[in-house]
Amino acid sequence: MKAILFAYHEIGAAALESMLRNNIDVVAVFTHRDDPAEGGWFRSVARLAADHDIPVYAPDDPNHPLWTDQIRDLSPDAIFSAHYRKMIGSPILDICPGHCYNIHASMLPKYRGRCPINWVLVNGETETGVTLHHMTADADGGDIIAQQSASIADDDTAVTLTATLVLATGTMLDAVLDSIVCNTAPSTPQDGSMATTFPGRCAEDGLIDWSTSATTIYNLVRAVAHPWPGAFTHAGDRKLCVWEATVMPGAPGVEPGTVLSVEPLTIACSDGAIGIGAGQTDDGVWSTGANLASELNLVEGMRLGRSASISSPQKRSVLILGVNGFIGSHLSEQLLANDYEVFGMDLRSTNITHLVDRPGFNYVEGDISINREWVEYHVRKCDVVLPLVAIATPIEYVRNPIRVFELDFEQNLQIVRDCVKYNRRIIFPSTSEVYGMCTDEFFDEDNSTLITGPINKQRWIYSCSKQLLDRVIWAYGVHNNLNFTLFRPFNWIGPRLDSLDAARVGSSRAITQLILNLVEGTPIQLVDGGEQKRCFTDVTEGVDCLFRMIDDTVGRSTGKIINIGNPDNEASIKELAEMIVARFDQHPLRHRFPSFAGYRVVESGRYYGKGYQDVQHRRPSIRNATRILEWVPSISTEDSVARTVDWFIEDHVRTLAASPAGSEAPTGA
C-alpha cells in the first residue's frame, strides 16, 4: 500500500513508526515546521521521515491546489493523519475516497475537537484512549475502525498521558494496519448523541479560579503543566505559574485564594486547599512553593488571584465615543454598576438622560470630527477606548456612501492611531457585516472568508470600510503592539434600539421600521419577501459579553476577533415581523394605535436604491466568546422582541402625552 501521512508531535511519530514496521510504503510526509517556542520536547516527525529517506513537506496551506495536485500525482492508495494541526479538505480526501484515516487522541465520539489530552485531564477523567477513524469533512465524525483505551492515573500530567497514548497508538495500528491493506477493516458509525466536542486551548486558559474546588484546580495544573504554558495566578501585579500541586485540607470559612501557610505554600479553595509544590514567577526561575512565598513576600492571610493587589486599585476608566447610541447607553449602565468611570461623547443625550447625573459618568456633547483635541486627550487619559460612532443603516450606505467612508473609516482611523500613540487598549466594533456575501453556514472569526459584492453595489462600502479598518488594527497589533479586541455584534435588539423618527426617514434597523409601521398603521414592508435570515441577540446578553472584554485585565481577549450573537436565534425578517405583530396585539396599550394594515412585499432596489444588495443569512460561530470569555447566550428571540416592542410602545405613548397634540393620538377600531 502506498500512503501519504500528515503528522506531527509524538503521536505523529508513533504513527509513522508503526506504518514503517508494517511495511506501508509511505511516499510522502506532510508536517509542520518545528516551533522552538514549544520547547522541542517531542520527537520531530520531519527528522524521523528524513532518516528513512521519505520526502517531507511543511506547507502553510496543505489544501492549496498546488499541493492537492502534487498529492494526486503521487497516486496514494490511502491517506493517514496523526496529530496534524490543520484540517484536510475535501479536494485531498477525494483523492482516496473511503481510504482516508485519522488518529484522534480520545475514545470517540467523546472529546472530539482540539486538545483532547489536555481536556480529559482538566475534566478529571479516569480513562481515555486513541481512535482510528475514517477522515471526512465532518471533523472527528467519521466511522470508527479501531480504538485502544488507556487508564489515566491520578498523578498523570499531559506529558505522561501523551507517552501512554503514544504506546496505545502503536499497539492499535500494529493490530489493524494489515486489515486496512487487505480492505477488510471493520467500520462502525459513531453515535452522534454521545458526542462531546471541545475547543482549542490557549495560554490564558490556565488562569486559576480559586473559587472552584481543590480537585478542579489540581486537574488544571496537571493538564497544562510544563512544557505546556502552565496554570497561573497573580500575587499583586506579579504572575505566578504553578507547575506542581497537591490537594490538601482546607479551612472552612476562609475566602478562596487566601494564603493559609507559606511553608508549605498552601492556598484556600472553595472546597479544600492547594499545596504549591513548585512554580515560577514571570521573571524568575523554577522554585519550590516555600521559596516562591519568600520571593513574593507572601504572608498568611494575603489573597492570590485575578483581583489580588498590593495597593488599592484606581477606578478604571472607559472612553465611549457614541455613548448615546444603542450599545453605548446600555454598556454605560453596566460599567457604572461595576464601579467603572465612563467618559462619553455624542451629538445628543436622549438615551442617557438617566445617567448624566450619576457619579462616574462624564458626558460631553460633541462630534469626533470636530472635537479632535477632546478626543485625543481622553484617549490618553482612559484605560479602554470604544469608538462606537458609525453610520450603520443600509439605506445610508446607498444614499451617502462617501459620508459612510469618511466617518466609519477615516475618522475612526484617527482614533486608532491615537490608541497606538498613547498605548491604550481599543475595543473596536467590527460588525458582522464585514462577512458580506460569505456563504459559510456559520461565520467564523478566524477562518471565514470575507466577501463583498460588486463595486456598483454601494451597500458594501460600509462592510469594506469596517473590514479595512479591522486589517489596519490587526497590523498595528502585530507590528506596534496595539492592545486590541475586535467584536462583531450580530443583530442585537432591545429597548432604545434606534428611534421611530429615524425609522421615518429610513435610517434605522429593520425591527424599528417594522414597529413604526404598526404604530402608524401602515403596511409592513417585507423587502424581497423578508426571506433574509438573521440571528437576533438580546442587548443585555450582548453587553454582558462586551463588558467581559473590557473587564479582561489578564489579556485573554487581546488580539482576538469575537462574534457576539446567538446562533440558536435564527429567524427570517418575515418571521421577526410576525413575532412583532403578535406581541403588539398582546400589549395593553394596543387600542391606542391603528389597526394592522397587513404585509406588502417590496423589491430591495425600490426600497433602498439601486446600489443595494444583501446576504440571505448571517449566523455566527461563538466559539471564541465561549472559550475566551465563558459567554453563552440564552435569551430567546421571542423574549427579546417582547421587551423591544413594549419599550417602543410605551416610549411612543409617553412622547405623545408630553406633546401639545398628545390628546390627538390615533386609536384603533
Image (cartoon, helix red, strand yellow):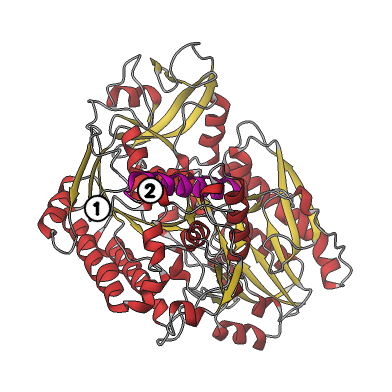
Q: Is residue 288 visible?
A: yes
Q: Are marks 2 and 1 in contact (CB under 8 Å)?
A: no
Q: Pointer 2: what residue?
A: 662
Q: Nearer the viewer, residue 250 or 574?
A: 574
Residue positioned 48% across, 31% down in the render: 244
Q: Nearer the viewer, residue 268 or 507?
A: 507
Q: How far is disc 2 from disc 1 in space, using C-alphas?
A: 24 Å
Q: Residues within 10 Å of mark 2 (few under 14, many from 20)?
A: few
Q: What's the amino acid at mark 1?
A: Arg
Q: Quadrant of residue 85?
A: bottom right
Q: Which mark is residue 176?
A: none
Residue positioned 87% across, 72% down in the render: 182
Image depth: mark 2 or mark 1 in front:
2
- Of callouts 2 and 1, which one flags the residue occurring earlier in the amino acid sequence? 1
Q: What's the amino acid at mark 2?
A: Gly
Judge left or right: residue 200 versus residue 235.
Answer: right
* Residue 643 part of the magenta segment: yes
* Residue 576 part of the magenta segment: no
The outermost residue toward the left is 373
Above or below: residue 290 compared with residue 597: above
Q: Pointer 1: what residue?
A: 348
Range covered by the magenta-colored residues: 633-660
What secondary structure predominates along the stretch shown in magenta?
A: helix
Q: Is residue 83 visible?
A: no
Above or below: residue 648 compared with residue 507: above
